[in-house]
Amino acid sequence: MSFSIRKLVNANVYLNGVSYAGLASEVTLPEVKAITKDHQPSSMAGKIKVPMGLDEMTLTIKGDFDAAFVAASADIYHVQLLQIRCNLPGYDESGRAIEQSVVAHIRALPTGHKPGAVKGQEPSEIEYTFNVWAYKLEVDGVPLYDLGLTTNKHQVLGKNLLSTANDNLGV
């Protein structure tokens, strides 16, 4: 059974190795999507879409964090290291409820934050957005994705999808 993980709730977020007070109420993980280009050689009667790399990936975190997290994530000039940990509820083949541990390791540049409305003098939930440079997603210790846009790394379930291209480039 294959699945894709895009949203996590009640996740622990570590920014540059520091755990700040509070849980992320919602985390939207990056979507891995190819950039394609139309290709129509003279020997073909039609066009095909050819993958040319990965589209930009964004990470969104919603939560009420410590003021130090707001200050650190406002540094839009330095790459930040994020680690997001969460338990993902699910069911096994026999129908029993199970929990899987999900860990996302992300290297990203903050692109800003958007504060929510204050309601009854309660803390405001803030939405943080990051532009992802590297992304590694593990479920129960098994890496699903391991991507590096600056290092030309693209591994899925341990298989290097760019091994031939990197060998040709001498990387």
Image: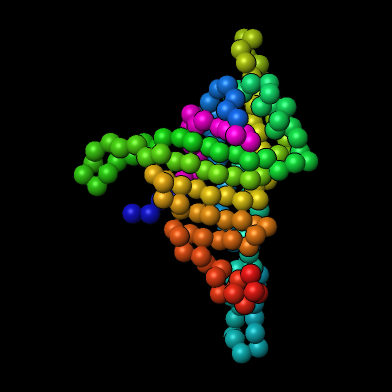
Q: Is residue 112 left or right of residue 3?
A: right
Q: Quadrant of the N terminus?
A: bottom left
Which residue is more in the foreground, 113 or 151? 151
Which residue is more in the foreground, 97 or 150? 150
Instruction: Please say whether residue 81 is visible from this viewpoint.
Output: yes
Residue at x-position 50% and y-position 31%:
11
Work out which residue is located at the far top of the displayed protein and give it: 120
Residue at x-position 52% and y-position 67%:
161
Work out which residue is located at the far bottom of the displayed protein and give it: 43
Q: Is residue 6 above or below residue 122?
A: below
Instruction: Please say whether residue 55 is visible from this viewpoint.
Output: no
Give the total number of marks visible in the rendering.
Answer: 0
Work out which residue is located at the far right of the displayed protein and give it: 77
Q: Is residue 77 magenta?
A: no
Residue 142 appears at what percent x and percent y? 41, 50
Work out which residue is located at the far left of the displayed protein and give it: 94
Which residue is more in the foreground, 9 or 83? 83
Q: Quadrant of the C terminus?
A: bottom right
Residue 101 appears at what percent x and percent y? 41, 39
Q: Is residue 45 above or below residue 60?
A: below
- Main structural element of the magenta stretch: helix, strand or loop? strand
Image-quadrant location for residue 150? bottom right
Which residue is more in the foreground, 28 or 67? 67
Q: Is residue 127 above or below residue 93?
A: above
Q: Is residue 6 magenta?
A: yes
> What are the residue bounds of the magenta stretch?
5-17
Residue 51 appears at what percent x and percent y? 60, 68
Residue at x-position 39% and y-position 44%:
140
Residue 149 appears at what percent x and percent y? 65, 57
